[in-house]
């Protein structure tokens, strides 16, 4: 038979308990050997440990869970990397000395019913700590032993006498030895055992004996601790606990080869190099926190607690009056007294384009402790907004440097976005994109009170953007915009050296809307059937003319002959249609009402002028995609102050530039992936769209601009001087009392 290699364990194979060989992996084999605490011991290939030295969570099937569901586990298998943790390090000589004092308790321990025996003895010999009265009730039987102190009457004075002559007796500094016999009425015995050890058969019991003196007698305390050196030695081997933590971690970056020196004073500072933003966070209930601090970890006596809460941060201080132990615990790291959790959560709200009001309301409904909206506004203004601006400046500088080093002129696309939409917009963001690289080069935010009216904001945004490009000494050769009348005049008079194109999509969209509207008139329904083909004809005219405005004009006007089944005689540059034979279809009769309405649209004065400048290749579709991203970070119907609106605009630009060159996704077979949608305007016609690879998010969670609150507040006050005055402060405000006094309901006289 093979006996268990653990100290004070008499289990052998064949007694109905599972036995486990030492692991072959030298790392775990060394851990198992160190856990035995046997000097000079080296396990052989046949050395085993029994199942009693492993916690239940180290088994593949938890025995308690299996018993609860009625499943009998015959053979308990260990998890890969299981580590034994339950041992009795009591010195055999000490056990023989204590056996006569606690023979009944130890016999129960060896028989496997130790926990029940301790409970029965405690109930039978319970003694009040406060008034010295007996309490034999069983009402507190469910209280854990590690949070309970038992006081028993002295029934055998020999126990105290043996403790005085024991070599392991430890006398506290407060104890007094008089040298004469003292009549002692009673003494208190406190047995403290951790909860995990109480459930096991191999127990190391720590006992403190405090003598309770009679009135007028000085207090004497004597403490005996079982195998104190072994316990301290176990705590000193912190590399074992570190390996256990790595073992329980699901991360693939666990490093079992690293074993720090036990004498290294900095071995506990393992979290200093961890990025707080990437570190995992958990929601912890307050009752679970209270369970950790209500009892002293040294003596088990009840502790007094004080809590300090700052948003998502909590600081707990506990003190024990019995042993004067004080503990301090913080739920998250701090940076210059700022809880990093508050900074990270506030940054996550802004960087994800979320609404602070909605998220804080969610936390309120879930009773999750969180900062107020005022705190969020301060963190956003003082730390997040400056950080976003700093990152955008570095990104923009990199884009300008790359464009300058290429030595090529820029082909830009420009477009504006009003917020909120309509003729009374407060903000307009104007964006310039490099159509070659599909990157946002510059974006400007214009507030309404900076110009004469809302119509002039788009021109102002373009002027600021072109001025920024000129400051970087970059040359612009082409500019693609929509058909904004003020921009057309500005580019014609101020920048004649720049070729100004009109975006094909904007022109086609306007033509299609007019055709759809005319097609709903009486006797003009046939135009609705031709509307999609005529709008597609616009793209063909632009693509096939290579920028020749006159050729584009003749190709465009040829549609009036084509719909009447006439395919030649269009003009000197485009004499006939280039298509082959056509199938018979519903043609429009020349001179009919439908033809006259179509001719008004095709030969419109402004359209005939602008069709010649339609872009042959570049389009602003990338800018339209950017505007969708911007709607995510800054919805049109949500109001933001100027600084916050600008920050969200820059965030959208950073996110778009990071993902603008994503490739189309492929399935496991290597085929390109498409998605099909059915827009309402297509009337049941499906549209195929390319599915791109997953987006990436690079967020900024560090105080890289301002390191203190005072510095951030001073810099924010200086920055606000350069921002436009809020629109609400432009007019003289009436007093609140006067407004309330003049308030009248519409239903009153």
Image (cartoon, grey):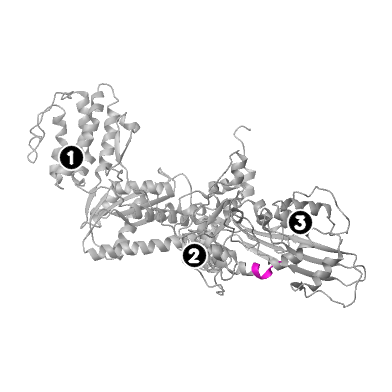
Q: Secondary structure at mark 2?
A: loop
Near mark 3 (Cα within 10 A), the count class, few <14, some 14-19 or many ≥20, is: some
Q: Is residue 562 above or below residue 429?
A: above
Magenta region:
226-231
Of badges 2 and 1, the one in the foreground is 2
Near mark 2 (Cα within 10 A), the count class, few <14, some 14-19 or many ≥20, is: some
Report which residue position mark 1 lands on: 540
Q: Is residue 680 visible?
A: yes
Looking at the image, tell me whether mark 1 or mark 3 is earlier in sequence order.
3
Q: Is residue 617 above or below residue 258?
A: above
Measure the C-alpha gap from mark 3 to mark 2: 60 Å
Residue beneath the point at 43% across and 50% down: 633
Marking on residue 672: none
Q: Quick check: is 230 in the magenta stretch? A: yes
Report which residue position mark 2 lands on: 703
Q: Are marks 1 and 3 in contact (CB under 8 Å)?
A: no
Q: Quadrant of the C terminus?
A: top right
Q: Position of residue 599 (x, y in %)?
A: 20, 31
Of badges 3 and 2, the one in the foreground is 3
Q: Secondary structure at mark 1?
A: helix
Residue beneath the point at 7% across and 37% down: 575
Looking at the image, tell me whether mark 3 or mark 2 is earlier in sequence order.
3
Measure the C-alpha gap from mark 1 to mark 3: 97 Å
Report which residue position mark 3 lands on: 105
Q: Quick check: is 505 in the magenta stretch? A: no
Residue at the extreme bottom: 179
């Amino acid at each position: 038979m093979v006996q268990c290699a653990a100290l004070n364990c008499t289990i052998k194979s064949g007694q109905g308990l599972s036995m486990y060989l030492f692991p072959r992996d030298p790392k775990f084999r060394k851990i198992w050997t160190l856990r035995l605490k046997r000097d000079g011991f080296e396990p052989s290939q046949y050395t085993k440990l029994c199942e009693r030295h492993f916690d239940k969570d180290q088994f593949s099937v938890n025995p308690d869970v299996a018993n609860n569901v009625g499943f009998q586990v015959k053979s308990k298998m260990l998890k890969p990397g299981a580590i034994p943790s339950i041992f009795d390090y009591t010195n055999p000589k000490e056990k023989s000395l204590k056996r006569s004092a606690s023979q009944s308790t130890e016999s129960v321990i060896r028989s496997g019913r130790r926990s029940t025996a301790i409970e029965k003895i405690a109930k039978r010999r319970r003694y009040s700590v406060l008034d010295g009265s007996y309490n034999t009730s069983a009402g507190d039987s469910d209280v854990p032993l590690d949070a309970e102190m038992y006081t028993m009457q002295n029934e055998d004075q020999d126990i105290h006498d043996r403790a005085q002559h024991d070599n392991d007796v430890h006398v506290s500094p407060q104890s007094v030895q008089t040298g004469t016999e003292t009549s002692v009425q009673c003494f208190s015995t406190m047995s403290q055992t951790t909860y995990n050890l109480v459930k096991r058969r191999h127990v190391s019991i720590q006992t403190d004996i405090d003598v309770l003196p009679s009135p007028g007698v000085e207090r004497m305390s004597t403490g005996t601790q079982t195998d104190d050196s072994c316990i301290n030695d176990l705590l000193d081997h912190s590399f074992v606990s570190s390996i256990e933590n790595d073992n329980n971690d699901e991360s693939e970056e666990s490093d079992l080869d690293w074993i720090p020196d036990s004498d290294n004073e900095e071995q506990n500072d393992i979290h200093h190099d961890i990025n707080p933003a990437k570190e995992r966070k958990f929601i912890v209930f307050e009752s679970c926190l209270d369970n950790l601090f209500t009892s002293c970890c040294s003596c088990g006596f009840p502790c007094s607690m004080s809590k300090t809460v700052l948003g998502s941060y909590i600081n707990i201080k506990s003190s024990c009056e019995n042993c004067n132990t004080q503990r301090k615990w913080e739920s998250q790291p701090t940076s210059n007294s700022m809880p990093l959790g508050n900074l990270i959560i506030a940054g996550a709200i802004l960087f994800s384009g979320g609404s602070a009001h909605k998220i804080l309301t969610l936390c309120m409904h879930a009773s999750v402790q969180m900062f107020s909206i005022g705190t969020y506004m301060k963190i956003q203004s003082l730390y997040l907004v400056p950080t976003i601006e700093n990152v955008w400046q570095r990104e923009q500088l990199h884009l300008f440097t790359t464009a300058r080093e290429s030595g090529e002129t820029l082909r830009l696309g420009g477009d504006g976005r009003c917020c909120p939409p309509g003729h009374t917009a407060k903000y307009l963001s104007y964006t310039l994109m490099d159509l070659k690289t599909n990157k946002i080069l510059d974006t400007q935010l214009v507030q309404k009170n900076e110009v004469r009216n809302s119509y002039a904001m788009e021109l102002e945004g373009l002027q600021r953007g072109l001025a920024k490009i000129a400051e970087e000494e970059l040359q612009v050769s082409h500019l693609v915009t929509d058909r904004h009348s003020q921009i057309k005049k500005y580019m014609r008079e101020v920048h004649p050296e720049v070729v100004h194109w009109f975006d094909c999509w904007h022109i086609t969209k306007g033509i299609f809307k007019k055709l759809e509207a005319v097609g709903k008139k009486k006797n003009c329904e046939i135009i609705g059937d031709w509307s999609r083909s005529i709008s597609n004809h616009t793209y063909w005219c632009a693509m096939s003319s290579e920028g020749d405005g006159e050729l584009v004009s003749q190709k465009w006007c040829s549609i009036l002959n084509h719909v009447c089944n006439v395919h030649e005689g269009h003009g000197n540059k485009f004499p006939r249609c280039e298509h082959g034979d056509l199938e018979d279809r519903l043609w429009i009769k020349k001179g009919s009402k439908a033809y006259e309405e179509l001719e008004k649209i095709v030969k419109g004065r402004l359209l005939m002028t602008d069709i010649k400048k339609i872009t042959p290749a570049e389009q602003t579709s990338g800018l339209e995609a950017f505007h969708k991203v911007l709607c995510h970070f800054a919805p049109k119907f949500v109001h933001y102050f100027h600084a916050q609106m600008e920050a969200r605009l820059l965030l959208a630009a950073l996110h778009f530039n990071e993902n603008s060159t994503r490739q189309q996704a492929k399935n496991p077979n290597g085929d390109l992936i498409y998605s099909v949608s059915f827009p309402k305007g297509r009337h049941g016609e499906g549209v195929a769209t390319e599915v791109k690879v997953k987006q990436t998010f690079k967020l900024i969670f560090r105080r890289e601009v301002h390191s203190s609150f005072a510095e951030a507040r001073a810099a924010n006050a200086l920055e606000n001087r350069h921002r436009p005055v809020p629109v609400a402060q432009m007019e003289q405000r009436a007093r609140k009392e006067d407004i309330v006094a003049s308030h009248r309901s519409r239903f009153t006289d």
